Image (spheres, rainbow, N blue to C red):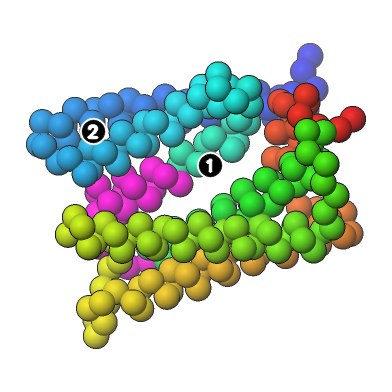
Amino acid sequence: MQKPEQQDQSREFNAHRIVIRVLLVLMAVEWILLLLDQRWLSLFLVTFIIGTVFSPILFRSRMQVEIPAEFHLTAVIFIFASFYLGEVQDFYQRLWWWDIALHTTAGLLMGILGFLLVYILNESKRVELNMNPGFIAFFAFTFALAIGSVWEIFEFGMDQFFGMNMQKPMLGDPSGLTDTMWDIIVNALGAFVISFSGFIYLKRKESFFVKKWIRSFIEKNPGMFKS
């Protein structure tokens, strides 16, 4: 009989497998339709989503790193919501709050990724580092801000060179500056929530949901970490 923890892992694995398969079928059909319609930019975005679905294979074969199911599923769902629903299906125009919600979520996710990266480096036996909780939290926050800034540059470039409308100019501000600033602000808020939560966890060992993600990554890649 399986232990409760094993049962949870089994349910997570099954949910991950079902969602990924459904998304792959949907993206494959969409890819063919976009190719027939010659919508090249949307085709590129859908191709990128499909590549993200298969990314664990690349990490496993090239870097000998196992990506936990919850990491992969979170990344795929976010990219699907951002690129497919947002850009291909035009949710950014249909729902005024879609852009704000995704940028806030991006801040949370990039904060988590930054926290995980520096925490893993701190615990890895391949790298001799010993960083305090304050620095780990600060790195997570600045990492999320940096990624958010790179994304805004990407949006600006796509608008300038391909005539897209990724910056979403607002009424009274056709330049898109207001949209860009709000994107950066909500991204920073999301990053701060995760960074501060991680700092409290490291200082006081209080509950922090990312702890489960860290433990999952360590369990799948034990050779990377100190005993």
Q: Which mark is residue 30?
A: 2
> Mark 1 belongs to which amino acid?
Thr
- Pinpoint residue 51: horizontal percent, then vertical percent: 39, 31
The x, y position of residue 122, in whole percent, is 79, 45
Q: Earlier in the sequence, mark 2 or mark 1?
A: 2
Q: Residue at x 29, y 59 (%)?
A: 157
Residue type marked 2: Glu
Residue 225 x %, y %: 81, 32
Q: Which residues are magenta?
A: 78-97
> What secondary structure is marked by label 2?
helix
Does 131 sit left or right of 162 as displayed?
right
**Frontmost residue, 16 versus 56:** 56
Circle 2 crowding by C-alpha within 10 Å: few under 14, some 14–19, many from 20: some
Task: Identify which residue is drawn at 70% across, 33% down.
Answer: 217
Magenta stretch, main secondary structure class = helix
Cα gap from disc 2 to disc 1, whole angstroms: 21 Å
Q: Position of residue 90 (x, y in %)?
A: 24, 54
Residue depicted at x 25% and y 47%: 88
Query: Does residue 168 appear in this view?
Result: yes
* Labelled pair 2, 1 in contact (Cβ < 8 Å): no
Q: Is residue 169 magenta?
A: no
Is 89 within the magenta? Answer: yes
Q: Quadrant of the C terminus?
A: top right
Tell which residue pokes out farthest to the bottom in this image: 172
Say what secondary structure mark 1 lies in: helix
Label 1 sits on residue = 74
